Image (spheres, helix red, strand yellow):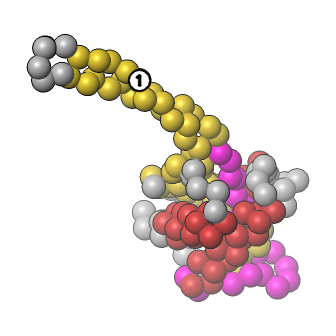
Amino acid sequence: MKVQSEFADDVSFAGLTTFAWVSPDDSAVSESRISPRARNRIVAAVERELEAKGYRPASAGTPDFLIGYYAASRYDVEVTQVYDYWRYGGGYNVYQDTRELRRGVLMLGVVDPARKEVVWRGWASDVVNDPEPAKVDAKIDEAVNKILADFPPKG
């Protein structure tokens, strides 16, 4: 799993304590075409990780930050050329091995409510071929954990 993040270096993340979810109408950060099950798992995993870091959902008023996500997958074809050498007779065979891979990306974005701008973003990408729900859940949990390991930024 490949994980990266970036942030606005002119923003202080010190003193943040409360969060709320970005409305899908407010930002493309939360615009995703995924199943309700995956959506619920992402929300639960993000809330669990943020609360473990000491953040809490805003009960009223303006939160210190908004969080949103974007998730998507696409199918790619991976082609590998294989050379099969014959030991006796000096010949070889060349054939191609192809397989279809489903690659997924999960991006989390932190929005400053005053500026209405994304001030931190982290994402993970990996092959997500297994359709078994328990394995999908584990992959989502792993991705959220690794993404939020970089939040707040140490910069």
| Residue 139 in picture, x, y percent from top left | 56, 64
Q: Is 19 left, or right, of 124 in this rendering? A: right
Q: Is residue 97 above or below residue 132?
A: above
Element under label 1?
strand
Is 136 or 20 nearer to us in this picture?
A: 136
Number of marks in the image?
Answer: 1
Q: Residue at x 56, y 37 (%)?
A: 100
What quarter of the picture does the N terminus occupy? Answer: bottom left
**Amino acid type assigned to the residue bearing label 1 in the image:** Gln
Q: Is residue 6 visible?
A: no
| Residue 88 in picture, x, y percent from top left | 11, 20
| Residue 149 in picture, x, y percent from top left | 48, 70
Q: Is 12 left, or right, of 88 in this rendering? A: right
Q: Quadrant of residue 52?
A: bottom right
Q: Residue at x 84, y 56 (%)?
A: 24
Q: What crowding class fits label 1: few (fewer than 14 Cα within 10 Å), some (14-19), or many (20 or more)?
A: few
Q: Residue at x 42, y 63 (%)?
A: 155
Q: Is residue 93 visible?
A: yes
Is 85 or 132 nearer to us in this picture?
A: 85
Q: Is residue 72 magenta?
A: yes
| Residue 67 in picture, x, y percent from top left | 70, 65
Is 139 or 63 nearer to us in this picture?
A: 139
Q: Is residue 61 magenta?
A: yes
Task: State the residue lying farthest toward the front.
Answer: 88
Task: State the residue lying farthest toward the right.
Answer: 25
Q: Is 134 left, or right, of 43 in this rendering? A: left
Is 60 or 44 nearer to us in this picture?
A: 44
Magenta residues (range): 53-73
Q: Which residue is mark 1?
A: 96
Q: Quadrant of residue 43?
A: bottom right
Q: Is residue 106 above or below residue 95?
A: below
